[in-house]
Image (cartoon, rainbow, N blue to C red):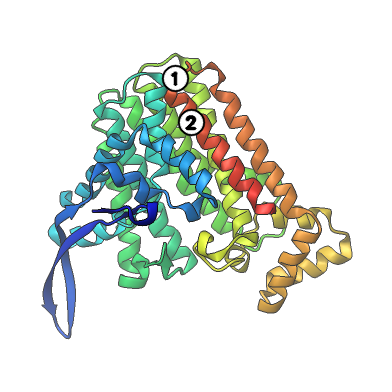
Amino acid sequence: MVDRTNGSYRAYATYGLRKDRARTGQEHRIVAWRRVSIDFPPSVFILVSVHPSQTGTPEKSEVLKQTFELINAQLYAVEERIRGQARAFDPAVEGYVAYAVESNGKRLRPALALLAGGATGDISASHLDLAVVVELIHAATLVHDDILDGADKRRGQPTANAKWGNAISVLLGDCLFAHALKISTSFQNGEVGRRIAQAASEVCSGEIIQTQRRFDLKLSVPDYYKIIEMKTGALFAVATELGAFLNEAEPEVIGNLRKFGLRLGAAYQVYDDVLDLAGEERIAGKTLGSDLRKGKLTLPILHLLQVSDAEERHRLCEIILNGDEAKIGQLITRAIEAGALKFAIATGRRMVREAQEQLRIVPANKYRDALGGLCTTLDEMILRLVD
C-alpha cells in the first residue's frame, strides 16, 4: 500500500508471520517463520530501499530513485528470490535465515550487478542469480560483523546475536556463505563460481586482518587501503565484473568494471568510516566513534597520527589504547581540527573519480549513466560530511 498524503510517499510492506514453537524443557524455541502474505508492489520497491536520510537531501534521494527505477522490476524479482532462499533450508533453520535476509538494506550490491549487466547488454536471469548471491554473502558478513562488534542492533532491529546468541549466529553466517556458494555453482560458466568464491575469500580475509590489527598503532595507511579493498571493495568488484562477464563483454570492459566496483567500494568504506566520526547517529545507525572504541583505526585517525608530532602522537595513542570515554570525544575533535577528516574526505572523493574514469570505455547507455550517477551521489554524500 502506498500513501501519497501531502505529496510524500510512504510504502507499507505487510507480512503475515506464523511462529511455530517447540517446547524444549523450560523454554520455547522458534522453529520457523514463514511468510504467509505480502503487499509490496514493485513500483514502490526503491522507495523502501533508499530513504532520504541515507542521502541527506531530497535532491540526492531523487537522483538515486531515478537511478534505481531503471532496474526496479529486476530489483523486485531479486528481493523475492532473496526472501525465498530461506525455504531452501530445514524448517528448524528457516526462521533464522529468513530473519537475516529480510533485514532490508539498500541492496546496493545487487543493484550494481544489474546495472553492470544493463550497461553491457541484457539483464538476464543469470544476473538476478548473481544479485542474490552477492547479497547473501553480504548478509553473511553482517551477521559475523555484529558478533565481532558485539552489536545488539542493526538498522534499528535486534541483531541475530542479540536474539539468539553468538553460537547460533556464527553458524547462521556460515549457512548464508555456504548457500551463496552453492547457488554460484549453478552458473553455466564455472568461472563465475570461481570468481564469487575468490571474492568471498577476500572479504573474509579482509575482516580477519582488520580484527587481527585492532589497536595496532603500527597500522599504516597502505595497510588500511588493502583492508577496505578486501572487506568492502571485493564484493562491489565481483558484482560489476561478473555483471559484464555474463554478457560476454569485451575483456577490457570487464576489467574496467571490476576496477570501477573496487574503487567505488573503497570510497563507500571511507565515507562510512568518516561518518562514524563526524556524521549523525540517525544516519550512521550507530554511536559515533564506535569503530575507534573497538580499536578499528580508520583513515582519519591514521592520518591524524601521521601528522602529529611525537609528543601529541604519544598522547593520542594512550587515548586509543586506554579507551577513556571522555577523551575519545577529544580525539575526534582533534581529528577535525588537524584536518584529518578533510584528508579522508578528499581521499574518498578521489576514489570516486577513479571509479568514474573506468566507465569511459563502457558503451554509452542509460545503465552506464546510472553507474556514473551512483558515483555522483556518493561524491555529494562524502562532500556533505564537511558541512
On the picture, is 227 further left or further right than 173? Answer: right
Q: Is residue 95 left or right of residue 105?
A: left
> Is 182 or 123 nearer to us in this picture?
123
From the top left corner, tell me how far across and down residue 49 is, in percent: 37, 49
Q: Position of residue 318 (x, y in %)?
A: 75, 71
Q: Is any part of residue 156 visible from this angle?
A: yes
Residue linked to disc 1 = 365
- Give the image quarter of residue 123: top left
* Residue found 72% across the figure and 75% down from its top: 327
Q: Using the image as rendered, state which of residue 327 and residue 281 is in the foreground.
A: 281
Which amino acid, mark 2? Leu
| First along the sequence among labels 2 and 1 | 1
Q: Is there CB contact under 8 Å for labels 2 and 1?
A: no
Does residue 226 appear in this view? no
Type of amino acid at the residue the image marks with label 1: Asn
Q: Nearer the viewer, residue 346 or 71?
A: 71
Residue picked out by circle 2: 371
- Give the number of marks: 2
Q: Mark 1 packing: few (<14 Cα in 10 Å), some, or many (20+)? A: few
Residue occupying the point 43% across, 33% down: 238
Tag 2 secondary structure: helix
Q: Is mark 1 on a helix, strand or loop?
A: loop
From the image, which quarter does the C terminus lie in? Answer: bottom right
Tell me what residue is drawn at x 74 percent, y 48 percent.
343
Q: Is 170 situated left or right of 360 in this image?
A: left
- Disc assigned to residue 280: none
Q: Quadrant of residue 164?
A: bottom left
